[in-house]
Image (cartoon, grey):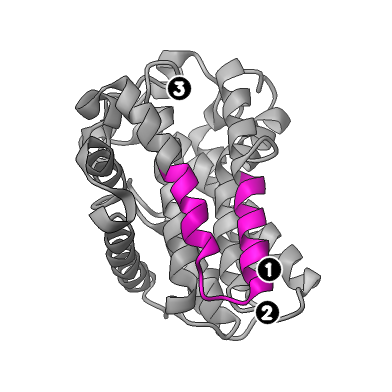
């Protein structure tokens, strides 16, 4: 059996060191902006997206090193999204990863600009990767697409408008808001290994795997929002109920939600298991379903 927790921890350590180097004074300057970027990016988070970038690169013959710029970039994009999510104009959360949210620590204007800077810097980092020119272009395009109107921000608008009054609409929202960056991370790992040709069948498999993983991840988050402990999660629980927003448990019982998580995990595992060396990626969906934060 693959030790999923150990692999995630090792990949997180590599990513943390990489982010620390990128967020140096030489690369981003000094002052409050750098402090706020480091505050919201370093020292926290599961680094699942980074692990996906690294492990997909390894699956297709690459190394952790070649994937690290993409892993770091996707973590910056994720950090920017959380900073903005927590602001009073959106989810209005005071805590993130067990400490005050960026806008509480630094003020709303600084938090807004920190998120903007992390997003733009992510593309600089990704564009500087040592992958092939084709791989870099495809990864940067993928980050832009899945972070944008037909990806994460499009899903965030749906969330803000609270239009997901059916399960189908809610799954569309989750596909955009949550699965999108997971797709971007996974695909970037594959793109880190390509030389002069993209295998579109591989892209299709990675995309479907990541879609299932992302949906299961979000449904599990909805369960934790209902049943979890704020101290363990490092953020408030009951947020959706407080804000009057739909989530998975608006349409199914907790037991049905757990069954749906397992169905999606099994589908993701089946898709990726045909690739030799995919043990970690095949087991990851089941591991994430068992988490308590």
User: Residue 239, percent across and down?
Assistant: 39, 23
- Tell me what residue is drawn at x 73 percent, y 72 percent: 202
Label 2 SS: loop
Residue 147, position in %: x, y? 59, 43
Residue 288 lies in quadrant:
bottom left
Whether tag 2 and tag 1 are in contact, CB under 8 A, the answer is: yes
80 w.r.t. 121: above or below? above
Give left or right: position of 184 versus 90: right
> Are the residues at dot 3 and dot 2 in contact (C-beta closer than 8 Å)?
no
Residue 139 position in % (x across, y down)? 62, 62
Residue denoted by label 2: 274
Gap in Å between the C-alphas at discs 3 and 2? 38 Å
Mark 1, other Cα within 10 Å: few <14 / some 14–19 / many ≥20 = some
Please tell me whether the stretch drawn in magenta is mainly helix, strand or loop.
helix
Task: Using the image as rendered, state which of residue 79 and residue 9 is in the foreground.
Answer: 79
Q: Which residues are magenta?
A: 118-146
Instruction: Say which residue appears at 49% left-offset and 45% top-offset.
Output: 120
Alpha-carbon span between mark 2 and mark 1: 7 Å
| Residue 237 visible here | yes
Q: Is residue 215 visible?
A: no
Label 1: element kind: helix
Circle 1 residue: 271
């Amino acid at each position: 059996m693959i030790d999923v927790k150990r692999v995630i921890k090792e990949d997180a350590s590599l990513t943390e060191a990489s982010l620390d180097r990128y967020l140096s004074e030489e690369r981003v300057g000094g002052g409050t902006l750098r402090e706020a970027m480091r505050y919201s990016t370093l020292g926290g988070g599961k680094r699942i997206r980074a692990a996906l970038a690294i492990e997909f690169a390894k699956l297709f013959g690459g190394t952790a090193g070649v994937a690290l710029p993409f892993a770091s970039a996707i973590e910056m994009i994720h950090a920017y999204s959380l900073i903005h999510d927590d602001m009073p104009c959106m989810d209005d959360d005071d805590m993130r990863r067990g400490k005050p949210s960026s806008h509480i620590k630094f003020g709303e204007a600084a938090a807004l600009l920190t998120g903007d800077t992390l997003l733009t810097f992510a593309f600089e980092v990704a564009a500087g990767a040592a992958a092939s020119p084709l791989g870099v272009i495809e990864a940067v395009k993928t980050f832009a697409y899945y972070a944008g109107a037909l990806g994460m921000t499009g899903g965030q608008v749906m969330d803000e408008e609270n239009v997901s009054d059916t399960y189908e609409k809610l799954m569309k929202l989750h596909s955009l808001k949550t699965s999108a960056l997971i797709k971007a991370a996974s695909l970037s790992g594959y793109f880190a290994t390509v030389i002069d040709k993209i295998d579109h069948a591989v892209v299709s498999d990675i995309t479907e795997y990541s879609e299932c993983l992302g949906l299961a991840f979000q449904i599990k988050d909805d369960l934790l929002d209902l049943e979890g402990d704020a101290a363990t999660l490092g953020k408030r629980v009951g947020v959706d109920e407080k804000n009057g927003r739909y989530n998975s448990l608006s349409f199914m019982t907790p037991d049905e939600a757990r069954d749906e998580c397992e169905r999606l995990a099994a589908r993701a595992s089946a898709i990726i298991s045909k690739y030799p060396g995919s043990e970690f990626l095949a087991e990851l969906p089941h591991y994430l379903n068992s988490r308590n934060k």
